[in-house]
């Protein structure tokens, strides 16, 4: 498994998880231009990412998520009650997603039912 911290702070958050050919972006707090630049520095094309999981609705976590989904064809997931997630719940969510990333075959649709995620279209 590989993990890249693309940015963390009040101006944006994004973590890329890769395992067995699957890539999941956790949070997308940067616009598409900024995110594409950060991904380029690690040699990753944005359209090679399978999905984005938004941990909660703060702008520094969701700013570019919808645009990136449309531009690069990502699946986009968020929990039904992102505004009530506690820090512990977010941490557990990240562990579950990292474990899922390792278990997924490349480009397989994500199934995140145990945490009751909503697929955003």
Image (tube, rainbow, N blue to C red):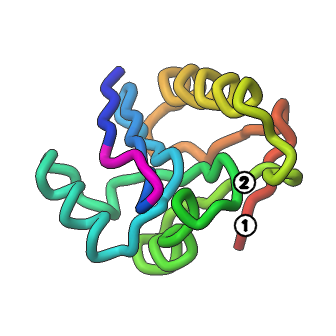
Q: Is residue 90 left or right of residue 28?
A: right
Mark closer to the chain start, 1 or 2: 2
Q: Image point 48% across, 22% down: which residue?
A: 102
Point out which mark residue 91 bears: none
Highlighted range, magenta: 6-10
Instruction: Please give the count of numbered marks on the rendered protein.
Output: 2
Q: Image point 21% across, 51% down: which residue?
A: 44
Q: Position of residue 113 (x, y in %)?
A: 83, 38
91 shown above or below 17:
above
Asked whether 68 or 58 is in front, the reply is 58
Our reading of the magenta stretch's main secondary structure is: loop
Q: Image point 34% across, 63% down: which residue?
A: 47
Check if residue 8 falls in the magenta segment: yes
- Label 2: which residue? 78
Check if residue 35 falls in the magenta segment: no
Q: Tag 2's secondary structure?
A: strand
- Whether residues under marks 1 and 2 lie with C-beta atoms below 8 angstroms apart, the answer is yes
């Amino acid at each position: 498994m590989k993990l890249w911290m693309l940015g963390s702070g009040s101006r944006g958050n994004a973590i890329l998880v890769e395992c067995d050919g699957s890539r999941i972006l956790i949070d997308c707090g940067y616009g598409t231009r900024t995110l594409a630049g950060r991904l380029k520095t690690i040699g990753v094309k944005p359209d090679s990412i399978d999905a984005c999981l938004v941990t909660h609705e703060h702008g520094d976590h969701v700013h570019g998520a919808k645009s990136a989904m449309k531009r690069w064809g990502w699946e986009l997931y968020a929990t039904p009650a992102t505004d009530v997630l506690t820090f512990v719940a977010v941490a557990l969510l990240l562990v579950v997603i990292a474990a899922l990333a390792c278990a997924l075959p490349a480009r397989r649709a994500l199934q995140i039912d145990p945490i009751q995620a909503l697929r955003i279209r």
